[in-house]
Image (spheres, rainbow, N blue to C red):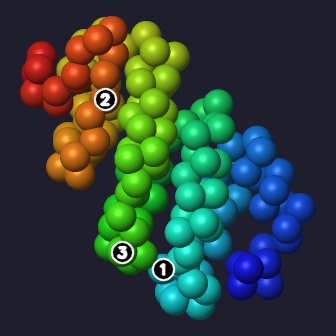
């Protein structure tokens, strides 16, 4: 609960509910700097905020996942991995991406997810970053 000294709890809850992950950047910076502890619960809530966003930015999600690995030493649970794969799948569907080579951000994200053992399945197939490049 140390984060409540740094972010208004109403803003935090609204951000979580509405997928406004940009509002949580200052909080993430404080976590990176070690000013507040990066608890599993807090990291999970930030991940949920990404999942609720209607305007998901794959580079921003990838940045957060990198922060989880590098700064917070957070091991993603199977449930979190499934949530992340679902976000990427939803992004692909929303943007009507049929060829991975059509969208560099998706291709780059799939390469990153593959490196951390997260598979994305669309229409019963596992998407491979090199499948149609």
Reading the chain from its start, which is encountered first: label 1 or label 2? 1
Furthest toward the right, the residue is 10
Q: Is residue 25 visible?
A: no
CB atoms of marks 2 and 3 within 8 Å: no
* Label 3 secondary element: loop
Crowd tier of the residue under label 1, counting other residues whose Cα lies within 10 Å: few below 14, some 14–19, many 20 or above: some
- In front: label 1 or label 2: 2
- Locate residue 26: give its quadrant: bottom right
- Residue 18 versus residue 106 in the image, above or below: below
For image coordinates 72% across by 84% down, the residue present is 2
Q: In the rendered image, which residue does mark 3 sit on?
A: 73
Tell me how far mark 1 sits from mark 3, CA to CA.
11 Å
Comparing 28 with 38, the one in front is 38
- Locate residue 128: give its quadrant: top left
Crowd tier of the residue under label 2, counting other residues whose Cα lies within 10 Å: few below 14, some 14–19, many 20 or above: many
For image coordinates 42% across by 24% down, the residue present is 89
In the shown orientation, is residue 108 left or right of residue 8? Answer: left
* Label 2 secondary element: loop
Q: In the rendered image, which residue does mark 1 sit on?
A: 32
Label at residue 132: none
Label at residue 120: 2
For image coordinates 57% across by 84% down, the residue present is 37
| Residue 18 at x, y percent in the picture | 76, 42
Reading the chain from its start, which is encountered first: label 2 or label 3? 3
For image coordinates 36% across by 74% down, the residue present is 73
């Amino acid at each position: 609960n140390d984060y409540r000294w740094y972010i208004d709890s109403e803003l935090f809850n609204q951000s979580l509910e509405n997928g406004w992950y940009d509002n949580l950047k200052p909080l993430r910076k404080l976590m990176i700097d070690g000013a507040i502890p990066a608890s599993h619960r807090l990291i999970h809530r930030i991940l949920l905020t990404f999942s609720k966003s209607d305007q998901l930015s794959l580079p921003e999600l990838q940045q957060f996942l990198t922060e989880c690995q590098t700064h917070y030493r957070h091991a993603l649970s199977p449930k979190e991995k499934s949530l992340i794969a679902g976000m990427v799948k939803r992004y692909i569907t929303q943007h009507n991406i049929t060829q991975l080579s059509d969208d560099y951000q998706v291709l780059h994200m799939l390469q990153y997810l593959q490196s951390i053992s997260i598979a994305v399945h669309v229409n019963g197939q596992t998407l491979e970053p090199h499948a149609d490049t």
